[in-house]
Amino acid sequence: MKVKKLLQILDTISPFELQEGWDNSGLQVGNLENDCGEISIALDLDDEMIKELPENSTLLTHHPLIFSSLKTIEQNSYPSKYIFELIRKNINLISLHTNFDKTHLNIYVAKEILGFSDCENSDFVVEAKIDKSFDELLEFVREKFSLENVTFVKGKEKIETVSLTTGSGGSMISNIKTDCYLTGDIKYHDAILAKSLGISLIDITHFHSEKYFGEILHKELQNNNVHGIIRLLNNPFSYK
């Protein structure tokens, strides 16, 4: 299969036109006329993975390696060192980021991981109705995501509505009407804002909330008669 054919299939799964204007989903490195070779799927690219990837293959990631404009390409810096290695090994790199968040990742985590049945997907946010105390929800979320440590803001005792954004959704707190917001990368001022609005927060972390990308896309590719290999990425954080 040629890269351009794989891109067409991916576009039917999760249209690239749905990505945000600041995003950079699509073909990152490679050639449309290249053969795909072995197709791998991973959340991100790191040193260990790039060593394992076979030459003349294709990697599908959630996060774009090339995200903002590159003003210099220095071989020992990030992300340039990976770009050099991808080109050297003739590996095609394709990313599905905010378009995949909207079409698949958020709703999958809400329904399949957390088991929320009464929920609606609206752009980047999934809204669900539940009936739990905050403490019950906190322990439930900790267990479902296998979180070693949980950062949270307790804004309400009774939780009847939950909103979810995988990855990093702190910038949307002021526009969300909910009892509890689940997202990753929560910052200090996000917590201050949520507390002032009476909203509870639970930090489900960027990695733990998006690590399901591979299994979701793998199933979609199988449905389109494309074989892919899921490559697991180690969490870059350590906990003590």
Image (cartoon, rainbow, N blue to C red):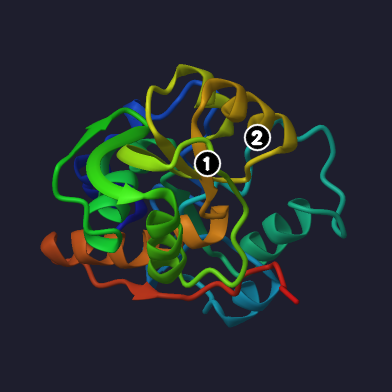
Res 123 → quadrant: top left
Amino acid type at circle 1 is Leu
Badge 2 marks a residue whose secondary structure is helix
Instruction: Say whether disc 1 or disc 2 marks the residue closer to the N-terminus.
Output: 2
As drawn, the label of residue 191 is 2
Q: Position of residue 215 (x, y in %)?
A: 31, 67
Q: Nearer the viewer, residue 64 or 51?
A: 64
Name the quadrant of the N terminus. bottom left
Which residue is under mark 1?
201
Q: Position of residue 58 (x, y in %)?
A: 44, 64
User: Could you tell me if the residues under marks 1 and 2 are in contact, i.e. CB atoms within 8 Å?
Assistant: yes
Report the side of 103 relative to 53 (left or right).
left
Badge 1 marks a residue whose secondary structure is strand
Note whether 200 is above or below 175 in the view shown: below
| Mark 2 burial class by Cα count in 10 Å: few <14, some 14-19, many 20+ | many
Q: Residue furthest top?
A: 175
Q: Is residue 180 visible?
A: yes
The residue shown at (45%, 51%) is: 94
The residue shown at (49%, 71%) is: 56
Amino acid type at circle 2 is Ala
